[in-house]
Image: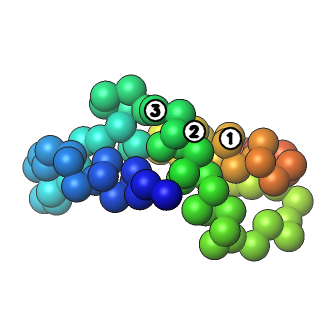
Amino acid sequence: MPMLLEDVYAGAPTVKSGRHITTVNEFTDQSPALRPEVLAEATRRLIELGDFEAGKILVEEDKGAILGSAVSLAVGLPLAVAR
């Protein structure tokens, strides 16, 4: 099985953001557009790691909503987005 997430980060350009260096990539920045197979892999890997004995999934609006939505659908929990 391909490791798409590692490829996304390995090939991503780095930029300086304030005092920090970060990457610009399709997973966190949708640049280029996020491929569905990358989102599916991230969702699957998170579900394998997580414990979803909860009443809802809470994510932050800027970077978490896309993955949180996919996980919400996959595990059948409501989604709450913090702003």
Numbered marks: total: 3
Residue that lies at the very extreme toward the top in this rendered image: 33
Relative placement, left or right, of 34 versus 65 is left
Q: Earlier in the sequence, mark 3 or mark 1?
A: 3
Relative placement, left or right, of 61 versus 3 is right
Write down the residue under mark 3: 35
What residue is drawn where x is 67% and y is 42%? Answer: 70
Of 16 and 19, nearer the camera is 16
Write down the residue under mark 1: 69
Can residue 70 be seen in the rendering of this structure?
A: yes
What residue is drawn where x is 88% and y is 59%? Answer: 55
| Disc 1 secondary structure class | helix
- Tell me the CA gap for discs 2 and 1: 5 Å
Q: Which of marks 3 and 1 is in front?
A: 3
- Graded by Cα atoms within 10 Å as few (under 14), some (14 to 19) or many (20 or more), the crowding at tag 2 reads some
Relative placement, left or right, of 21 versus 51 is left
What residue is drawn where x is 24% and y is 42%? Answer: 24
Asked if disc 2 and disc 1 are in contact, CB closer than 8 Å, the reply is yes
Of 45 and 30, nearer the camera is 45
Write down the residue under mark 2: 66
Residue 59 locus on image (x, y percent): 62, 51
Can residue 17 be seen in the rendering of this structure?
A: no
In the displayed structure, would residue 30 be above or below residue 28? above
Q: What residue type is labelled 1?
A: Ser
Residue 32 locus on image (x, y percent): 31, 28
Residue 16 locus on image (x, y percent): 11, 49
What residue is drawn where x is 70% and y is 49%? Answer: 71
- Graded by Cα atoms within 10 Å as few (under 14), some (14 to 19) or many (20 or more), the crowding at tag 3 reads few
Q: Nearer the viewer, mark 3 or mark 2?
A: 3
